Each structure stands twice: as structure tokens, then as C-alpha cells.
Amino acid sequence: MLAVEPLSISPWTVFLYALFTAIATGLGALPFLFTRRILAHHLGLANAAAAGLMLSASFGLIYEGVHSGLGRTLLGVFLGLLFIQVSHRYLEGREVSFGALSGLDARKALMMVGIMTLHSFAEGVGVGVAFGGGEALGVFITLAIAVQNIPEGLAISLVLIPRGVSVLGAALWSIFSSLPQPLMAVPAYLFVEAFKPALPVGLGFAAGAMIWMVAAEILPEALKEAKAEGVATVLTLAAAVMVAFQILLGG
């Protein structure tokens, strides 16, 4: 249990730290400043990398949630799975627009940004709960989430930019997907004990939705554009690097 120190840190300080994590998500679009022309094969491998990053991040969320409550985490996974399936069925066959995108591209973009936004609610609560345990713990968790947000921004950009969204637009959408972090961090900090029981549900919810998105959308897209051997290799390496990174941050 974290020691509760109400208002020992200014809520504005907590907000600014959490805002930093949101801005870091936009850095994921930076690689596209150097290359805008992506062949179908490269796009497939990029989708495989995004799938690996998202899978490892998802299992990382489940791992964190289980520490607070196995049952609540699994409940969150089920709710996330149910939510994304219902959302997919609702959007399927409907005319959807997302900025300048329409049709299938718009649905994929909307689901990607939507999942990452839901995921950010749990991360924002995590920042606030961490600051409830003291400034040192809060700063550490903030930095860990900020660095983890960069590949999440890359995953969003990999979906948006090849479909016609500008680098700046992808960066802004990436930041938008993380705005729940500063919005949720302050109330979670102020009411740390009240938010703790719901945290594993939120972590599991985001994980369940992301795993489904990887299996149903991102991997099939990657396999259409690149050979299975290449997709499997890139996915494995991306997942391994992300897991190693999470362990290093945790250590």
C-alpha cells in the first residue's frame, strides 16, 4: 500500500507532470519527418512493429493490474474485450469520417485513437495514485509512462500517416489520445484511496481492448502487406524490446 500524503504536492504540479506524459506521445510521429514515402511492404512491417509494441504494453498493463487485484484485472480485460467488439460491430458498415479520412481507413483510425484514449485514463490514474505515495515515486512513474507513450504515439502515427494524415496531425492526435492522463491524474491524486480499487479494472480494460485490436485489425493488415516471416520477426523483436524496456524501467 502506498502511504497517503494528501496535498503534500500541489495538484498543479501533478497536472503538469501528467501533461508531460501526454506531450511525449506526440514524439512518436517524429520518425515520419524523415520519411513520408512508405512502401506497402514497409507499412506491413511497421504495423507488425506496432502490434508487438501494443501486445507487450498490454501484458505489462495486466501484470501491473494483477498486483492490485487479479479478479478486477480480469474483469477489466473482459469489459475491454466486450467494449471493443461492440464498438467494432457498431462502426462496421457505417459511414464514418475521421478528419480527412472516410470509410474503412476512418474506422481503423477512430478505433486506434479511441483505444489509446481509453488506455490513457488508466495511465492518468496511475500517475495520480503514484504521487499519492510521494513525489519521488510520482516522478518515477511519470517518466516511465512518458517514455512508454512514445511508441504508443508511433503506433497511432503508423495508422494515420500512411492514410493521408499529416505528421503534425498525427502528433496532435497522439497527444489528444493521452489527454486523459493530466485530466485523471489530479482527481486520482486528491482521492487516491477511492481510485485505487478501480485501477486494475482500468488497466485490464485497456489491455483487453488493445489485444483484440492487434489480433483483429493490425496483424491482418500487416500480413496483407508483408510476408508472414517478416511480420513474425518484426513483431517478436518489437515485443521483446518493449518488455526489456519495461523491466529496465521497473528495475
Image (cartoon, rainbow, N blue to C red):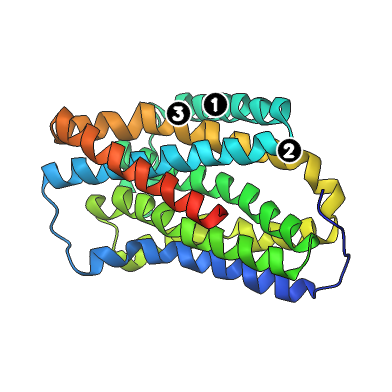
Q: Position of residue 67 (x, y in %)?
A: 69, 37
The residue carrying mark 1 is: 81
Q: Earlier in the sequence, mark 2 or mark 1?
A: 2
In whole angstroms, how far apart are the C-alphas of marks 2 and 1? 20 Å
Relative to residue 67, is residue 158 drawn left or right? left
Instruction: Give residue 135's position: percent from left, percent from top.
Output: 74, 70
Tell me if mark 1 has few (under 14), some (14-19) or many (20+) residues whose alpha carbon lies within 10 angstroms of its own: many
What is the spatial separation of the Cα atoms under label 3 and label 1, in whole angstroms? Answer: 7 Å
Name the quadrant containing residue 21: bottom right
Amino acid identity at mark 3: Trp
**Residue 111 visible:** no
Rate crowding at label 3 as few (under 14), some (14 to 19) or many (20 or more) other CA atoms within 10 Å: some
Categorize mark 2 by other alpha carbons within 10 Å: few (<14), some (14-19), many (20+). some
Q: Which residue is mark 2?
A: 68
The residue pinned by badge 3 equals 212
Q: In the image, what residue occupies the spot 50% across and 47% down?
A: 116
Left or right: 63, with 228 as reference point: right
Percent x, y of residue 131: 75, 63
For the point 80% across and 39% down, the residue is 197
Going 24% across and 69% down the picture, which residue do you hit? 33
